[in-house]
């Protein structure tokens, strides 16, 4: 039987897949905004550039849909803890199999689903890292190096994520690549700027797929060629300066002191 799941999974073009999700969101009133496109593009780059051995089509589809029942209300703790599981149950009604739904449920760890799927570890990283790069009502977005320190030392402290260190290498590489427009800007920060400067969701989808993606693909290819030709070293130095790490760890300690807990969040 033909289902929505078959329809979107059979569509391999990411731009078309985004458009399908856009119209589903309009019809079914599921959560779908610019942050979803932003995080999906980070996932695409991570899988492509780090040559991660996973089903990219499945993961990018999950990136677009796993937040379908997310609530845009940070005060509703119960819904924050349950939206991924509720979303997975909804996706099953659209014809997705149990593994796909389990991957989406494991975007966070509130349902205590174990053992975790490897694809879920990628969703978790891009969801948390991507979210920290964007502005929120209570704070401005973090820089990529700051977000990566927070991801490792606060959000995922004491948790096992099989791709965490590879993701750190990815962020390191992206921080060495600049995209030139009117001014040169580091690649991830350029993506943040496009997100912030583009009001329409559909316009942002187009800019990511037809402008940013070709430029960053070319820039990564040129970066790798320069390394191969020995024009500069692909250094193994730490991703973050000691000063940045010290500053972020002090911030984490202050948060714990104010909340009166030593737990992570």
Image (cartoon, rainbow, N blue to C red):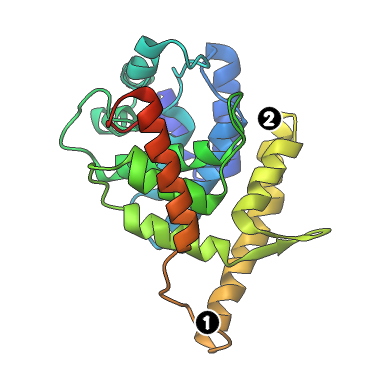
Whether residue 58 is visible to the viewer of this picture, yes or no, is no
Is 54 above or below relative to 27? below
Is 181 above or below relative to 118? below
Q: Residues within 10 Å of mark 2 (few under 14, many from 20)?
A: some
Element class at badge 2: helix
Labelled disc at residue 263: none
User: In front here: 3 or 56?
Assistant: 56
Residue at 45%, 19% in the rendered image: 70
Q: Earlier in the sequence, mark 2 or mark 1?
A: 2
Residue 83 image position (x, y, % from top left): 38, 17
Q: Which of marks 2 and 1 is in front?
A: 1
Residue at 35%, 40% in the rendered image: 154
**Disc 2 vs disc 1: Cβ atoms closer than 8 Å?**
no
Q: Distance between the residues labelled 2 and 1?
A: 36 Å
Q: Quadrant of residue 137?
A: top right
Whether residue 142 is visible to the viewer of this picture, yes or no, is yes
Which quadrant does the N terminus fall into? Answer: top left
Residue of label 1 = 227
Q: Quadrant of residue 98?
A: top left
User: In front here: 182 or 84?
Assistant: 182
Extreme residue in the left direction: 115
Q: In which quarter of the image is residue 226?
A: bottom right
Q: How crowded is mark 1: few (under 14 residues within 10 Å), some or many (20 or more)?
A: few
Labelled disc at residue 201: 2
Residue at 20%, 26% in the rendered image: 112
Element class at badge 1: helix
Residue at 57%, 13% in the rendered image: 27
User: In front here: 188 or 2?
Assistant: 188
Residue 125 image position (x, y, % from top left): 39, 43
In the shown orientation, is residue 86 left or right of residue 34?
left
């Amino acid at each position: 039987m033909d289902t929505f799941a078959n329809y979107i999974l059979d569509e391999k073009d990411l731009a078309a897949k985004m458009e399908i999700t856009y119209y589903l969101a309009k019809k079914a009133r599921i959560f779908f905004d610019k942050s979803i496109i932003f995080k999906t593009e980070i996932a695409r780059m991570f899988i492509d550039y780090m040559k991660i051995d996973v089903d990219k089509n499945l993961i990018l589809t999950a990136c677009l849909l796993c937040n379908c029942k997310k609530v845009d209300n940070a005060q509703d703790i119960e819904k924050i803890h349950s939206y991924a599981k509720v979303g997975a149950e909804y996706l099953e009604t659209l014809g997705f199999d149990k593994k796909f739904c389990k991957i989406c449920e494991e975007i966070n760890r509130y349902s205590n689903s174990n053992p975790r799927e490897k694809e879920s570890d990628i969703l978790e990283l891009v969801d948390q890292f991507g979210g920290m790069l964007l502005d929120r009502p209570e704070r401005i977005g973090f820089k990529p190096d700051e977000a990566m320190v927070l991801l490792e030392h606060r959000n995922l402290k004491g948790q096992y994520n099989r791709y965490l260190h590879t993701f750190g290498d990815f962020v390191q590489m992206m921080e060495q690549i600049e995209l030139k427009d009117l001014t040169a800007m580091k690649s991830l920060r350029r993506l943040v700027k496009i997100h912030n400067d583009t009001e329409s969701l559909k316009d942002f989808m187009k800019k990511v797929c037809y402008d940013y993606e070709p430029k960053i693909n070319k820039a990564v290819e040129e970066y790798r060629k320069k390394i191969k030709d020995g024009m500069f070293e692909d250094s193994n130095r730490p991703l973050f300066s000691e000063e940045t790490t010290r500053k972020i760890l002090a911030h984490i300690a202050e948060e714990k002191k104010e909340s009166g807990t030593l737990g992570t969040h």
